[in-house]
C-alpha cells in the first residue's frame, strides 16, 4: 500500500494517482454492519415472500372474476358471486372513523405530554400511553362491544337527529320516533371505529411525541423570549417542525387501522352495501371478512379470500411507504434519520 | 424607592427610551449547585452594559434571569429581585409574557424560524403576542426593524424567502430585527457575534450603537475589544474554583479597562488569566 512512484517520478511527474487508503472501519464495525444488513435483508425477503405468495394465489381469482372482483359488492360463494367493493369501502369507513377519533386525541396527548405536562408526571403518562398499546385487540373488541356500544348508540342517534341532513350522518330509520330503533345504530362502522381508534392511538401519539420533543430548543426559546405564551410557541415552532411526524404517524395508524381484525369481527354485523353511512348498522372489512369466512371456504373461495388479503396488503404497503417518505422528507425526519 | 425611579417609567406604546434594569442580590442554582451569589448590578437606561468574564462564571445564567428565561430549565432556582423601571419582574402580579416582550433577547446561536419568510420572521413577535397592526404599518415596521438591524439593504428584494436561506451573520441580524420589532425597552444579547465573521460583527456593533438611544442593551462578550468598543459600562464576573460566580468589579468601561481596582480584573482584561 505504500505509494511507490518508481522511476517514473523523474520522467513524468504529472502522472498522479489517487492514494490507496486503509480500510475505513475496524473489523468490529464490519461485523456489526454485516449482521444488521443480514437482518434487514431477511425482513425484506419475508415481506417480499408474503407479497409473492399472496400474488400467486390471487391469479386464479383475477382470471375467473376479472375486474368484476373489484366492482362487485356482494360476497355470496353459494351463488359464485364474489367481489370486494363493499368490503373495501367498509374497510376504509371503519379506518376513517378510527382516524377521525384517534387523530385529535393522539395529537393533543402528544402535545400535552411533550409540552405541558410537568416533568414529574411525564414519564408516567408516556408509560400509560404505551400500556394502551399492550392491551390485546380482543380486549378492545370486548370493551367496544359491551361498554362502548350501549353509549355509542345514543351518540349516533344524537348525531343523526341533529346533523342528519349531512349524508354521512344518515341512518335508514326515523330518528324522531317515540321509541327509536336502537338496533339500527348498533354494530356499525362507528362503533367498530371507536375500538380501532383506541388501538391505533398509542402508536400515533408516540410518533408525534417523539418528533415534538426534537423541536430545536433554540427556536423554542426564541419564541418564548419574544413574549409568546407556551401555546403560541407550540403553534409557531413545535407544530410546523413536527408536521411530517404528524402526517406520517397518522398514515402509519391508517395502515394499522385498515388491517385491524378481531375487534371488527366482534362488533360489526356483516353487510355488503355500497354506502357510506358509518352510523348505520352493518358493514364489513377485508380482514373481518377473511376471518369470518376462512373456516368454511372451499379451495376456490379460499383463493378469493387470499386475493382480498392481497389487495389489502398492497394498499397498506403503499400507505406505509408514503408515510415513511413524508416523514423522511420533512425537516424533523431529516434529523431523526 | 419607587417614587424616584418612577419618573422615567414609561409603558406607553412607541416609547423612545429604554428602561432601567436593576438586579438586586440575585443568586441562582441549578439543582443544588449554586452558580451565582448575591449579584447586584444596575443597567441604566440607554447605556450599553457589557458582561465579561471567563467561561462558566454565570454570565449567561445572569442574563437569562433578567428576562425570566432561567426558569425554563427544570432544575433552575433563584433568589433576589430584578427591577425594570422600579418594578420587580418576578413579583406575582407580573405577567411573564409581558415581561419577556419588554425585555428582548438575542441568543448566541442565530435562531430564526426557518420555515417562515424573512418578513414573517420580523413580525413573528407581534403575532405571538397578539398585537394587531394594519398592513401598511406592518410593512413600515418590517423596513424599520430590518434597517435598525442593518439588514434592510441586503434583503429588501427577498423578503419572501425563508429565514433559513440567509447566511449565519444575516440570520443573527434578522434575529436582532425580530427582537426590535416588538419595541422592547431592554435588549439582552448573549455573545451575539461569537458565530460571526469580522464584517458581520462590525455590522452588529454598528447596530448596537444606533439603537442604544432607544433600547437599554446588556451584552455578554468574550471579546475584550468588542466590550471596549460597544459598551459604556462593564461588569467583570468571576467564579473561583468551587465557588458560585459573582461580580468582582463593575463600573465605566474606560475605568475597568484602563484603571481596574481589582488585580483579578486587570489580569483578565489584559489577557493574563487562565
Ligand atoms: N442547564 C444547566 N444545568 C445545570 N447547570 C448549568 C446549566 N447551565 C449552566 N450551568 C452551570 O452554571 C454555571 C454557569 O454557566 P453559564 O452558562 O452561566 O456560564 P457563562 O459565564 O455563560 O459561560 P460561557 O462564557 O462559557 O458561556 C456553569 O458552572 C454551568 O456548568
Ligand atoms: Mg454563556
Image: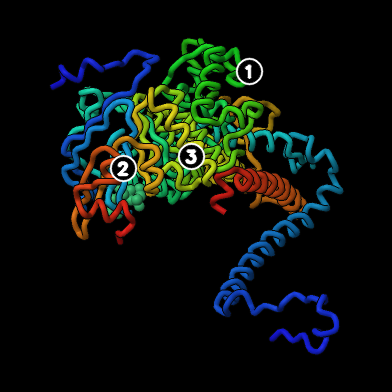
Mark 3, Cα crowd under 10 Å, few <14 / some 14-19 / many 20+, is many
The quadrant holding residue A44 is bottom right
- Between A14 and A273, the residue placed more toward the observer is A14
- Find the distance from the CA under tag 3 to the CA under tag 1: 48 Å
- Camera-near label (1 vs 2) is 2
- Please, which chain is the residue tagged with disc 1 on? A
- Please, which chain is the residue tagged with disc 3 on? B
- Find the distance from the CA under tag 2 to the CA under tag 3: 22 Å
Element class at badge 3 = loop
Is residue A83 depicted above or below A309 in this figure? above
Horizontal and vertical percent position of residue A168: 61, 21
Horizontal and vertical percent position of residue B93: 22, 22
Q: Residue A128: which numbered mark, if any?
A: none
Q: How is the image coloured?
A: rainbow
Side of B244 relative to A179 (left or right):
left
Element class at badge 2 = strand
Identity of the residue drawn at 42% across and 31% down: B209
Identity of the residue drawn at 43% across and 32% down: B208
Is residue B15 depicted above or below A260 in this figure? above
Q: Which residue is mark 3?
A: B111
Q: Which residue is mark 1?
A: A167
- Camera-near label (2 vs 3) is 2
Identity of the residue drawn at 75% across and 42% down: A78
Horizontal and vertical percent position of residue A229: 38, 28
Q: Is mark 1 within 8 Å of ligand 1?
A: no
Is residue A247 depicted above or below A5 in this figure? above
Q: Residue B51: which numbered mark, if any?
A: 2
Amino acid at each position: 500500500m505504500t505509494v511507490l512512484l518508481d522511476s517514473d517520478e523523474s520522467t513524468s511527474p504529472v502522472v498522479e494517482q489517487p492514494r490507496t487508503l486503509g480500510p475505513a472501519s475496524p473489523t468490529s464495525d464490519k461485523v456489526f454492519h454485516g449482521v444488521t444488513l443480514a437482518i434487514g435483508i431477511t425482513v425484506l425477503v419475508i415481506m417480499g415472500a408474503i407479497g409473492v405468495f399472496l400474488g400467486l394465489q390471487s391469479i386464479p381469482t383475477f382470471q375467473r372474476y376479472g375486474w368484476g372482483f373489484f366492482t362487485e359488492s356482494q360476497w355470496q360463494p353459494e351463488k359464485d358471486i364474489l367481489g370486494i367493493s363493499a368490503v373495501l369501502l367498509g374497510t376504509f369507513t371503519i379506518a376513517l372513523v378510527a382516524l377521525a377519533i384517534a387523530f385529535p386525541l393522539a395529537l393533543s396527548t402528544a402535545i400535552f405530554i411533550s409540552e405541558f405536562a410537568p416533568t414529574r408526571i411525564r414519564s408516567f403518562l408516556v408509560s400509560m400511553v404505551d400500556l394502551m398499546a399492550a392491551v390485546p385487540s380482543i380486549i378492545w373488541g370486548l370493551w367496544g362491544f359491551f361498554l362502548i356500544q350501549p353509549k355509542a348508540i345514543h351518540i349516533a342517534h344524537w348525531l343523526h337527529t341533529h346533523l342528519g341532513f349531512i349524508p354521512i350522518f344518515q341512518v335508514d330509520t326515523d330518528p324522531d320516533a317515540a321509541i327509536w330503533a336502537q338496533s339500527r345504530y348498533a354494530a356499525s362502522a362507528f362503533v367498530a371505529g371507536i375500538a380501532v381508534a383506541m388501538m391505533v392511538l398509542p402508536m400515533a401519539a408516540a410518533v408525534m411525541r417523539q418528533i415534538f420533543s426534537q423541536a430545536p430548543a433554540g427556536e423554542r426559546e426564541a419564541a418564548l423570549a419574544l413574549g409568546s405564551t407556551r401555546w403560541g410557541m407550540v403553534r409557531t415552532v413545535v407544530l410546523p417542525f413536527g408536521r411530517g411526524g404528524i402526517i406520517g404517524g397518522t398514515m402509519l395508524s391508517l395502515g394499522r387501522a385498515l388491517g385491524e381484525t378481531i375487534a371488527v369481527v366482534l362488533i360489526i354485523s356483516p353487510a355488503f352495501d355500497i354506502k357510506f353511512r358509518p352510523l348505520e348498522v352493518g358493514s364489513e372489512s377485508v380482514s373481518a371478512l377473511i376471518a369470518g369466512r376462512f373456516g368454511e371456504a372451499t379451495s376456490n373461495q379460499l383463493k378469493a379470500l387470499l386475493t382480498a388479503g392481497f389487495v389489502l396488503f398492497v394498499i397498506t404497503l403503499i400507505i406505509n411507504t408514503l408515510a415513511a417518505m413524508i416523514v423522511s422528507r420533512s425537516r424533523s425526519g431529516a434529523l431523526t434519520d | 424607592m419607587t417614587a424616584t425611579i418612577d419618573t422615567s417609567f414609561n409603558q406607553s406604546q412607541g416609547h423612545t427610551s429604554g428602561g432601567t434594569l436593576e438586579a438586586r442580590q440575585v443568586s441562582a442554582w441549578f439543582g443544588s449547585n449554586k452558580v451565582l451569589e448575591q449579584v447586584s448590578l444596575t443597567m441604566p437606561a440607554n447605556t450599553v452594559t457589557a458582561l465579561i468574564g471567563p467561561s462558566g462564571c454565570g454570565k449567561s445564567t445572569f442574563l437569562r434571569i433578567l428576562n425570566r428565561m432561567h426558569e425554563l430549565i427544570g432544575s433552575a432556582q433563584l433568589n433576589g429581585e430584578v427591577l425594570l423601571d422600579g418594578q420587580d419582574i418576578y413579583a406575582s402580579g407580573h405577567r411573564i409574557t409581558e415581561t419577556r416582550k419588554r425585555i428582548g433577547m438575542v441568543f448566541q446561536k442565530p435562531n430564526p424560524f426557518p420555515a417562515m419568510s424573512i418578513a414573517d420572521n420580523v413580525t413573528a413577535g407581534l403575532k405571538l403576542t397578539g398585537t394587531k397592526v394594519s398592513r401598511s404599518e406592518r410593512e413600515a415596521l418590517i423596513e424599520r426593524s430590518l434597517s435598525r438591524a442593518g439588514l434592510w439593504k441586503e434583503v429588501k428584494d427577498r423578503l419572501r424567502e425563508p429565514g433559513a436561506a440567509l447566511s449565519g451573520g444575516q440570520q443573527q441580524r434578522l434575529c436582532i430585527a425580530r427582537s426590535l420589532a416588538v419595541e422592547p425597552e431592554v435588549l439582552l444579547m448573549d455573545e451575539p457575534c461569537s458565530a460571526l465573521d469580522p464584517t458581520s460583527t462590525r455590522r452588529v456593533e454598528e447596530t448596537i450603537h444606533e439603537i442604544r438611544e432607544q433600547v437599554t442593551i446588556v451584552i455578554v462578550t468574550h471579546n475584550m475589544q468588542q466590550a471596549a468598543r460597544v459598551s459604556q459600562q462593564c461588569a467583570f464576573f468571576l467564579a473561583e474554583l468551587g465557588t458560585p460566580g459573582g461580580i468582582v468589579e463593575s463600573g465605566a468601561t474606560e475605568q475597568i479597562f484602563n484603571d481596574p481596582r481589582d488585580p483579578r480584573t486587570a489580569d483578565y482584561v489584559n489577557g493574563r488569566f487562565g
